[in-house]
DNA sequence: TTTGATATTGAACGCGCGTTCAGATATCTT
DNA sequence: AAGATATCTGAACGCGCGTTCAATATCAAA
């Protein structure tokens, strides 16, 4: 049974993660102090240690949750038949999933170096798993004969870099809607893979 | 005339910048102390202030020098006639120029947030100028009718993100040579722009 | 109303930070 | 050899860091 004596923890815990994410993304992990996070939440610094063993674990939890959510969402994404349709699904999914999660995406490849080797390995494995999802699609397309790629591995990296790059310039309410951006990027990707 | 009394500054100055670049790239600006940089150079922390007014100026100088060097090198790059040939020149130039400068490239888009607003604006303007170089090529290609792009601005961002991404995975002595990578990326870019 | 777990405060710990500067040292000019 | 200038040391400054912990406040259950 969920005991709830004297408990604000269901509020404070998520708020700590939210403020930490916001501050880490804005100023960088090393430049943000536990006292700053606590102040943003509205508690004293000591209270944070009810929710995280230390500062690094706070970062790790954010990155881990982001990667788990990404892989879970992709696993549940309905996809069409054939490599071409699946690639379109991937391209649109990547942009649609990542755009509203700018902070977490930013953290996930800017702050990896602040993790311990063990924690780094965990996140890196998840990232690799996601890359493999795309690589598998590309290989399938090669086998089907619908893609013409000089190098599948490089194409994987190129496409992911290109898609993730959207996060660096896209602004809600700007010239283009998210869906239009999806379509334009899909057009470029489709041509690049030679389909 | 360059006076040289009691001078090691021609050695120490560059070494400070080199060690700072290396450490900033590896651990992040905020995570590296002036004492660490000094120790790597082999001097006391106080000596650094003979060469930089403060820590941020050290970072700014690295980024500024990198961007100046990039733009100067591109300005001097011999290029073929027509948008298609010029685009190929750009793609190959970007990869060739940036691969041996991994530290500086990394810093130039990871540590911008550690600059003061004024210094940030300077670097951002230089980056923008570089992007405009590519955008101009793409517009010329559109006018010539050799490119078919749904959106020139997005294509600019997409291509730069894709090319810069090479730095994240390329390792000297790996499976592919730098020149092979250039060719593979050029193939994908060429197809993506619809040429 | 008491009990007892949960949640939080507020002060303290040792430590390393960026930066300054008086003094020492090294090198060049005369 | 002497003087001038450039370079560097080493100690110090106030400050904020991550983390700990006894004391206190809060609240559900009994």
Image: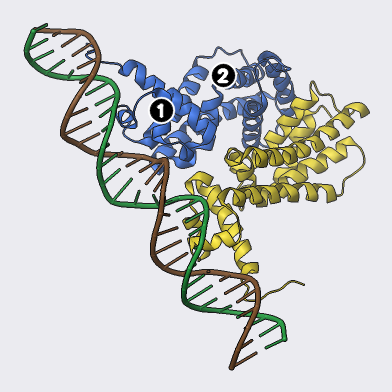
Chain colours: A blue, B yellow, C green, D brown
Q: Which residue is mark 2?
A: A100
Residue at horizontal 71 percent and vertical 15 percent from the top: A180
Vertical arrangement, residue B114 with respect to residue A90, above or below: below
Vertical arrangement, residue B189 with respect to residue B16, above or below: above
Labels 2 and 1 touching (C-beta < 8 A):
no
Q: Nearer the viewer, residue B115 or B78?
A: B115
Q: Nearer the viewer, mark 2 or mark 1?
A: 1
Q: Nearer the viewer, residue A64 or B191?
A: A64
Q: Which residue is mark 1?
A: A39
Sequence-first disc among 2 and 1: 1
Residue A115: horizontal and vertical position, in percent?
43, 40
Quarter of the figure with the N terminus of chain B: bottom right
- Taking the image as shown, residue A186 lies to the left or right of residue A100, namely right
Residue B58: horizontal and vertical position, in percent?
60, 52
- Whether residue B174 is visible here, answered yes or no, is no
Residue B171: horizontal and vertical position, in percent?
60, 49
Residue at horizontal 35 percent and vertical 21 percent from the top: A13
- Same-chain status of marks 2 and 1: yes
Q: Quadrant of residue B146?
A: top right
Q: CA distance from mark 2 to mark 1?
A: 25 Å
Query: Chain for mark 1?
Result: A
- Taking the image as shown, residue B16 lies to the left or right of residue B44, namely right
Q: Residues within 10 Å of mark 1 (few under 14, many from 20)?
A: some
Quarter of the figure with the C terminus of chain B: top right
Residue at horizontal 85 percent and vertical 27 percent from the top: B147
Q: Which mark is residue B54?
A: none
SS category of the residue bearing label 1: helix
Vertical arrangement, residue A15 with respect to residue B9, above or below: above
Vertical arrangement, residue B37 with respect to residue A80, above or below: below
Query: Chain for mark 2?
Result: A
SS category of the residue bearing label 2: helix
Residue A131: horizontal and vertical position, in percent?
55, 30
């Amino acid at each position: 049974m969920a005991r709830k004596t004297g408990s604000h923890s269901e509020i404070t815990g998520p708020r700590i993660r939210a403020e930490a994410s916001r501050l880490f993304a804005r100023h960088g992990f090393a430049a943000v102090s536990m006292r700053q996070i606590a102040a943003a939440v509205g508690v004293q610094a000591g209270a944070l240690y009810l929710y995280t063993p230390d500062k690094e674990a706070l970062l790790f939890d954010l990155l881990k949750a982001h990667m788990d959510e990404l892989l879970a969402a992709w696993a549940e994404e309905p996809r069409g038949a054939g490599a071409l349709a699946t690639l379109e699904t991937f391209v649109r999914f990547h942009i649609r999933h990542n755009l509203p999660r700018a902070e977490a995406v930013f953290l996930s490849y800017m702050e990896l170096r602040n993790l311990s080797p063990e924690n780094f390995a965990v996140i890196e494995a998840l990232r690799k798993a996601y890359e493999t999802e795309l690589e598998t699609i590309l290989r399938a397309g090669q086998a089907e004969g619908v893609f013409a790629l000089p190098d599948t591995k490089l194409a994987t990296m190129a496409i992911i870099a290109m898609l993730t790059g959207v996060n660096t310039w896209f602004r809600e309410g700007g010239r283009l809607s998210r869906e239009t951006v999806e379509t334009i990027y899909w057009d470029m990707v489709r041509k690049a893979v030679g389909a």
